[in-house]
Amino acid sequence: DIQMTQSPSFLSASVGDRVTINCKASQNINKYLNWYQQKLGEAPKRLIYNTNNLQTGIPSRFSGSGSGTDYTLTISSLQPEDFATYFCLQHNSFPWTFGGGTKLELK
Amino acid sequence: EVQILETGGGLVKPGGSLRLSCATSGFNFNDYFMNWVRQAPGKGLEWVAQIRNKNYNYATYYAESLEGRVTISRDDSKSSVYLQVSSLRAEDTAIYYCTRGVTTYWGQGVMVTVSS
């Protein structure tokens, strides 16, 4: 199975900050990497698919990058509604595997 | 508008079985493969199973941690997908989400609690 190591697990930041969240795969996942945002009590919402494609309706302050085994989600200027938990998912091969999550909190 | 609605959750005794249903609308169900993803209370996400569409002979894939205890199926005439889970254990307690394709759309989830 491909292991997805997500970091950091917790992140404190302020409105307006630029933040980055990382996912490292245990092997090449060929850019088949998605990012999700989950707020308390809600289903996850897909933000980015296949490394760097912004889901329709998602603000452009969210972006993704990476290749091979290393991937990054960047939020260019944090807004109050962005404080949530973020997950990555590799769908290059079965079983699909998620990162452990990053809880983004208000500093 | 894409709609996904999971039903069938509840409280089940260890060793019991459960069949979750996922009804969809707002898109051509026949064109998409479907997944189940679960989330234990306060924990991360775990992919559970996928079923592909007719073009891929309804191929199925399962998480190793559940293989042998879980069966995913679909009924294209009802635009629905199902998850049968047997020999339930406490660690199967989770919200089970139904998702379309590469998890583009998610239902609100259904809670399954395994407890005596």
Image (spheres, rainbow, N blue to C red):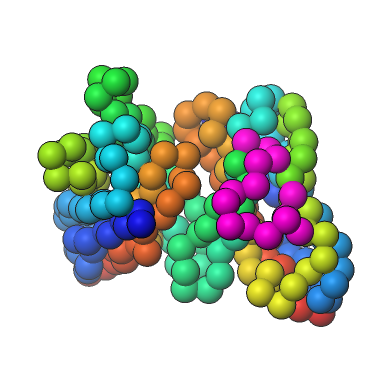
Q: State the predominant SS element of the stretch in magenta.
A: loop
- Toward the viewer: B27 or B63? B27
- At 56% from the left edge and 64% from the top edge, which residue is drawn? A38
- At 31% from the left edge and 45% from the top edge, which residue is drawn? B27
- At 73% from the left edge and 56% from the top edge, which residue is drawn? A60
Is residue A21 on the magenta stretch?
no
Q: Is residue B45 left or right of residue A61?
A: left
Over which residues does the magenta segment extend?
Answer: A50-63
Taking B14 as reference, is A54 above or below it? above
Is residue A59 on the magenta stretch?
yes
- Toward the viewer: B94 or A23? A23
Instruction: Residue B1: name its quadrant.
Output: bottom left
Q: Is residue B48 left or right of residue A56?
A: left
- At 65% from the left edge and 47% from the top edge, which residue is drawn? A54
Instruction: Residue B60: name its quadrant.
Output: top left
Q: Is residue B25 left or right of residue A12?
A: left
Give the quarter of the figure containing the C terminus of chain B.
bottom left
- Toward the viewer: B24 or A67? B24
